[in-house]
Image (spheres, grey):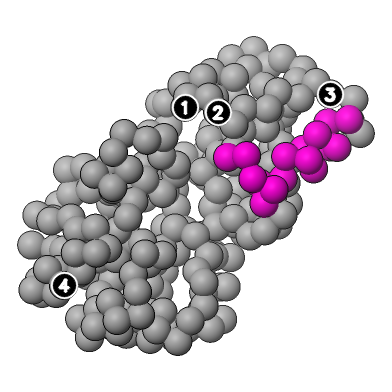
Amino acid sequence: MIAWISHHLPEFWQGKLVGGAEMTDATLLDDAPVEVKTFLPHQWREAMEFDQIVITGTDLLDAEAMTELARKEPVVAVHHLQTRSPERANLFNSAKVLICRTPKHLELELSWTNPKASDWVVSPLDPTEFTAKPKEDFALWAARWHQQKGPEQAIEWAQQNNLKLIMMHDKTRAEVLEAMSRAKHFVFLPQGFDAEPRSVVEAVLSGCQVHTNDLAGISSIPNWRDPKVLTELVTNAKERFWQIVLN
């Protein structure tokens, strides 16, 4: 049995709106090829009793937790760019393997850590979720309302290109995907490094013309604008993740 430590778990959020990291963890845990017991960060001492540990969220682990968990040589699989600290560096350096979301994400984490092994795996998605309807001449921006997600830059881009912009930051996933299926353009111009991000992948799979920058980690994957390339990656992501963990 594997101990899985993360704050990206349904019992932590208690029905609140969740993001890509929570959806990724839920998918990876669904029908996992081995028995898994989940633990929230404050329960890390209980997880120490297990022979193998997977950590997918380090944000809420304190210095003591990271120091002690490092002794177990866990798999560390992170969803976003990590805050640097001596204790986190020690945890990563002690990891059996460090898993990141994209090549650029991995490159940035390896610039300050030296794990025993490392790899990258995109978030698993079901390609059948996405449809490309006849495209309408408008641009879509969909993200959490935060300056790092570039809402002002999206507005400026749309104005410069004389396009109607629909901004969705408080809508359900179903509503966003429906709009994405019709949008000719998807604009996402992050102002800080975004490890994947999931919305760009979804836009490509929905047939949108995607306008982003190199702060979107997905842009570091060769031929990422090709839906066939991303379809293969997201379809195989869950199996590949567990192969790395169990190797």
In the displayed structure, 181 sits above or below 22; it is above
Front position among marks 1 and 4 = 4
The three-letter code of the residue at mark 2 reads Asp
Front position among marks 1 and 3 = 1
The three-letter code of the residue at mark 3 reads Leu
Front position among marks 3 and 2 = 2
Please report the residue visible at 50 percent of the width from the left and 69 percent of the height from the top. Answer: 82
Q: Identify residue for label 2.
A: 170
Front position among marks 1 and 2 = 2
User: What secondary structure characterizes most of the magenta part?
Assistant: helix
- Cβ atoms under marks 3 and 2 closer than 8 Å: no
Membership of 36 in magenta stretch: no
In the displayed structure, 202 sits above or below 117; it is above
Please report the residue visible at 90 percent of the width from the left and 25 percent of the height from the top. Answer: 162
SS at badge 4: helix
The three-letter code of the residue at mark 4 reads Arg
- Left or right position of 194 against 65: right
Q: Identify residue for label 3.
A: 163
The quarter in which the N terminus is drawn is bottom left
Q: Identify residue for label 1.
A: 173
